[in-house]
Image (spheres, coloured by chain):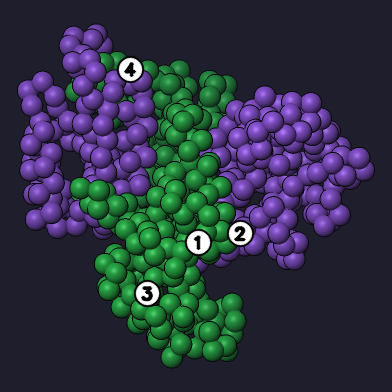
Chain colours: A purple, B green
Amino acid sequence: MTQPSPPASGVPTPVFFLAGGTGISAETLGNMLIGQFPGVPFRARKIPFITTVERAREVVAQMDAIHTDEMKPLVFSTVADEAVRAELIKTECAFIDLFGTHLDTVERVLHVNAAHNVGSVHGLGDRGRYEARMKAVDYAMEHDDAQSIKALDQADLILIAPSRCGKTPTSMYLALQQGLKVANYPLVEEDFDSHQLPAPIRPYAGKCFGLTSTAARLSQVRGERRPGSRYASLPQVTYELRRAEALYAMHRIPSVSSASMSVEEMAAVILQSMENGRR
Amino acid sequence: MTQPSPPASGVPTPVFFLAGGTGISAETLGNMLIGQFPGVPFRARKIPFITTVERAREVVAQMDAIHTDEMKPLVFSTVADEAVRAELIKTECAFIDLFGTHLDTVERVLHVNAAHNVGSVHGLGDRGRYEARMKAVDYAMEHDDAQSIKALDQADLILIAPSRCGKTPTSMYLALQQGLKVANYPLVEEDFDSHQLPAPIRPYAGKCFGLTSTAARLSQVRGERRPGSRYASLPQVTYELRRAEALYAMHRIPSVSSASMSVEEMAAVILQSMENGRR
C-alpha cells in the first residue's frame, strides 16, 4: 500500500473506544491497532456503558460533530447488542466492529448462535473467579514485603528480590488479574552472606520466582526514593543484584529482569514458568 | 442462522490465544467472543511471545495435533509480524486474526502503512506513562486504609467507605491500570456521629468518591473475616451503610455499590465521574 495523503501532520486523529460494558476490551485492542502507526498522533476517548439506542444516538451525534472531510475519526466498538450496534454503525466516522466481524466466524465454527449479550467479561459474571481475585488482593496486601509470614504455605507464588526491583506491582498485578495468592519477600545483605534463602521462605523454594534489574536502573529507582544514599549507590546495587542472581541460580529459582520488561510482560513469563513447572 | 450440528455436548472446545507479546489483548477479546456462547464449554490456553517463524511452526504443530474432524479448535491471534503470521495461518484450526482484519481498515482511513511491530501495548513502550503507573502503585500502597495521611494533597482520588466495601482492590486497579494516585480512607462510627468527613480528608471532598454495598453482601464479606462478630452483623452493616450513604449525599460525594459491580466496572464509572467533574 502506498501513502497517498497522510493526515495533516500534527493534528491528532480522534479515536473513540465504544462499549456496552467497561470498554476495557475495546480500548485494549484499539490501542494495539493504533500502536501500529507510531508516526501518527491520536487523541483517544473511551465511551463505556452504551446500553440503549438513545445513548447510541447521542454518541453518534457527538462523534459526527467532529468529523470533517479532512479528518475521519476512528471508532473501535465492542458493542454486542444488535439494536445498539445498528444505531452506532450509522456514524460517518470509520466504524471498526471488533466484535461482529469475528462473532460470525465463531458462530460458523461452533454451529451455535451467539447470545449478543452486553460484554460482561469484566463484570461480576463468574462470581467464584471474581471473589478469588478479591481474596488474592487481600492476600497480596497482607504478604507484601514480608509484612506477614503467616500462611506462606497457602501462597501460589513467592516473589523474591532486592528492594525496588518491582515485587509489589508485579504481585498486585498477578493477584488482581489472575487471582493468584502472591507473597513477596525482600532479599537483604544477610541472605547474601549465608547463600541461603531467608528462613521463612526456605521450605517453599519451589514456589519462588526471582526479580532482577540492571545496576543502572536499580540505582536510578532507589535514588528517587533516597537520593545520594549508599542504598542507591552503584557499588551497592551491583553487589546486591550479583548476589541475588547467584542465589537464584544456586537454588534453581527462575527469574526475570524488571529493567527490560513491564509488569504485564513479567507476569506473562511467570505464568508460563508456573505452567511448565506443573508439567 | 440455524443450529445444524452443535459440538458434542460436554466436550470442551479447545481455544488458543496467540500473541507476539503478553497475549493480554488476544485473551481479552477472545474471552469476550467466546463469552457470547454461554452454553458451550471451552478449554482455553494462552501462548504468548511467539516471535519467530520456528516458534510459530511448533505452535501450529501443537494445535493441529488436537484438531479432529469433529472438533475444530478456535485460535484467536494478535500476532502482528507478517512472517510469523504467515506461518500461523497454515493451521487447520479456525484461525481468527484479531489484528490483520482491522489493520487494513485503519490503514485505509489513515492513508499510512502499519508498522507490523510486535504488539507492545503491554510493554515498557511509553516509559513516562509506565513509570507513572508504578509510582501510583507505590502511592496506593502507602495510602491504603489511612495508613498514611501525608501527601493527600497529591492524590488524584480518595476512595471512602465502611470497611470491606472494596476500597483496596479498586484503589490498586486504578493505580496499576490508569496510573492514578489513589488514597483510600475508612469511614468509622465517629464519622457517622459527627456528620462530617474524617478530618484528614475534609479539605479534599472534591476528590472523594464513595463506595457502598448491600447489607446482605457486606455482612457476608465481613463474616468471612470475623464470623459471628458484631462487626459482621446485619444491624451493624445496615447502620454503617445507611450513614455512609447519607454522608455521601450531604457532602455531594458520588458513589457506586460493590455489591452489583466488579472492580473494573466501578473503575470505569469513577473515571467517567472524574472526567465529568473536570468539565
What is the distance, in whole Å, between disc 1 and disc 2 at their CAs?
9 Å
Q: Which mark is residue A141?
A: 2
Is B104 above or below relative to B71?
above
Residue picked out by circle 3: B196
Secondary structure under tag 1 reads: helix
What is the distance, in whole Å, between disc 1 and disc 3 at their CAs?
22 Å
Query: Is the residue at mark 3 from the same chain as the one at mark 2?
Result: no
What is the distance, in whole Å, between disc 2 and disc 4 at their CAs?
40 Å
Residue picked out by circle 1: B168
Kind of residue at badge 2: Met
Q: Chain of mark 2?
A: A
**In this rendering, the label closer to the viewer, 4 or 1:** 1
Q: Quadrant of residue A29?
A: top left
Secondary structure under tag 2 reads: helix
Image quarter (top left, top right, bottom left or bottom right) of the N terminus of chain A: top left
Q: Chain of mark 1?
A: B
